[in-house]
Image (cartoon, rainbow, N blue to C red):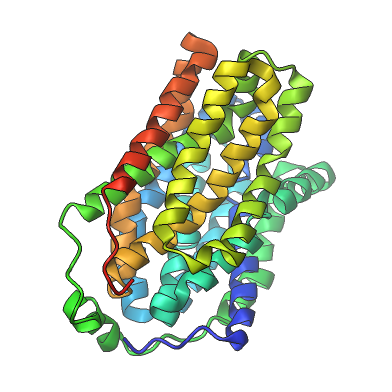
């Protein structure tokens, strides 16, 4: 495959793409947490309805993923990511103009399309299209930068909403995609010829001595990423309530929640500096085990383990973001990466869209006992990982 090596000059690409990813996540995935209440109040609908429409957007994103991946395989990531900025700008402007449930839903459908071709999976595919098997360092680099999306996005959304209302905040985020996001993604280098990438899609062409992965490998990846994705999204929605159900005070629950972000970034730094010397399977197994370990501590010790639980869960979640990009690359190689990544991620994205509701039902019925569900999913993912073997040349 005619992929350029990842060298020091490529760090500018990682910085630009990581910053663009920060903007994309902050203005979409993290937006409802702060704007759902004023949107619901202004439009005269229930707050759960706003999140239901957001779930629709996540499902649209899941369905759009494979098509976006195929386009990146064929043309490189530059065009697709630039198109995502236009879709983000259009969807956010439509959100600011919404006058009822119909307009709100249409805006979030457009934003779902934008997320499907503009968040991590698309960015990972763009980097693999550029750097081939050498993309692991670049993938880790953009997650280090975009790991601060909520840290930057939530305060900025709060400030914008306080100054101009929720509609003004949406219009401001829309403008930022045009004046910041587009120029940043323009800096992404053009990919090499598609024919070379297509040839590399055949494992024998990429490495004649390496056998192709077993047919069930992609299914195992889809299953384990679905399990881990369910846990990640469920904890993002319910962690404070879960910790309170385990006996923690609100203050302790909020403090524990504030540790998730730093733990994610610390784990990504560890991956960047240490774990890159080893197989991505090692990082993946760490990512799968940390939540069950934290859940076991919380169930056994009660609220005294709230902070260790948050640190363990956050570190695993930070590694998960990276291994979602690097493990398929190590298993299958760079050829056809974008489309394959879209299909592998599809079940997890759909399950992730439903997980806040499903886990909320279990939490309401069983309290802290809901941890048995999330820990069981983590252990299931770990079992899947034990069954995977990397090609000899990975």
Question: Looking at the image, can residue 234 be seen?
Answer: no
Residue at 20% from the left image edge and 63% from the top image edge = 213
* Residue 340 rendering spot, x and y as whole percentages: 28, 62
Relative to 61, does residue 299 appear above or below in the rendering?
A: above
Task: Tell me: 229 left or right of 2.
Answer: right
Quadrant including the C terminus: bottom left
Q: Quadrant of residue 374?
A: top left
- Furthest toward the right, the residue is 163
Instruction: Name the one closer to the observer, 162 or 24.
Output: 24
Residue at 48% from the left image edge and 55% from the top image edge = 115
Instruction: Name the one closer to the observer, 216 or 177.
Output: 216
* Residue 337 rendering spot, x and y as whole percentages: 32, 69
Relative to 258, does residue 139 appear above or below in the rendering?
A: below
Relative to 157, does residue 187 appear above or below in the rendering?
A: below
Question: Looking at the image, can residue 362 be seen?
Answer: yes
Residue at 59% from the left image edge and 22% from the top image edge = 298
Task: Tell me: 277 left or right of 70.
Answer: right
Quadrant including the N terminus: bottom left
Q: Quadrant of residue 191?
A: bottom left
Give the total number of marks visible in the rendering. Answer: 0
Residue at 49% from the left image edge and 60% from the top image edge = 120
Task: Tell me: 62 left or right of 142.
Answer: left
* Residue 286 rendering spot, x and y as whole percentages: 48, 47
* Residue 16 rendering spot, x and y as whole percentages: 63, 74
């Amino acid at each position: 495959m005619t992929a350029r090596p990842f060298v020091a000059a490529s760090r500018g690409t990682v910085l630009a793409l990581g910053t663009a990813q920060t903007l994309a996540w902050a203005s979409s995935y993290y937006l409802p947490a702060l704007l759902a209440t004023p949107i619901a109040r202004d439009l005269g609908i229930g707050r759960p309805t706003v999140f239901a429409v957001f779930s629709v957007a996540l499902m649209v994103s899941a369905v759009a993923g494979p098509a976006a991946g195929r386009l990146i395989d064929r043309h490189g990531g530059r065009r697709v990511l630039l198109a995502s900025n236009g879709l983000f700008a259009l969807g956010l402007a439509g959100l600011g103009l919404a006058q009822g449930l119909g307009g709100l839903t249409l805006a979030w459908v457009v934003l779902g399309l934008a997320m499907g071709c503009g968040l991590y999976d698309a960015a990972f595919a763009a980097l693999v299209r550029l750097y081939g098997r050498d993309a692991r360092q670049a993938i880790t680099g953009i997650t280090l930068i975009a790991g601060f999306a909520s840290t930057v996005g939530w305060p900025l959304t709060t400030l914008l909403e306080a100054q101009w209302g929720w509609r003004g905040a949406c219009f401001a985020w829309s403008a930022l995609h045009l004046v910041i996001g587009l120029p940043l993604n323009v800096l992404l280098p053009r990919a090499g010829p598609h024919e070379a990438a297509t040839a590399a899609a055949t494992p024998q062409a990429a490495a004649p001595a390496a056998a192709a992965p077993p047919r069930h490998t992609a299914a195992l990846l889809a299953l384990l990423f679905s399990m881990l994705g369910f846990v990640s999204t469920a904890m993002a929605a319910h962690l404070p309530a879960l910790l309170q159900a385990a006996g923690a005070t609100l203050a302790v629950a909020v403090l524990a929640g504030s540790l998730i972000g730093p733990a994610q970034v610390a784990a990504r730094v560890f991956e960047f500096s240490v774990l890159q010397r080893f197989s991505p399977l090692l990082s993946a197994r760490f990512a799968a085990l940390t939540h069950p370990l934290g859940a076991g501590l919380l169930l056994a010790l009660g609220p005294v383990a709230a902070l260790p639980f948050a640190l363990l869960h956050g570190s695993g979640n930070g590694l998960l973001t990276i291994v979602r990009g690097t493990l398929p690359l190590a298993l299958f190689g760079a050829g056809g990466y974008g489309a394959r990544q879209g299909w592998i991620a599809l079940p997890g994205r759909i399950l992730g869209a439903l997980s806040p509701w499903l886990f909320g039902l279990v939490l309401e019925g069983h309290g802290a006992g809901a941890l048995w569900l999330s820990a069981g999913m983590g252990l299931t993912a770990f079992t899947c990982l034990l069954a995977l073997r990397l090609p000899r040349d990975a």
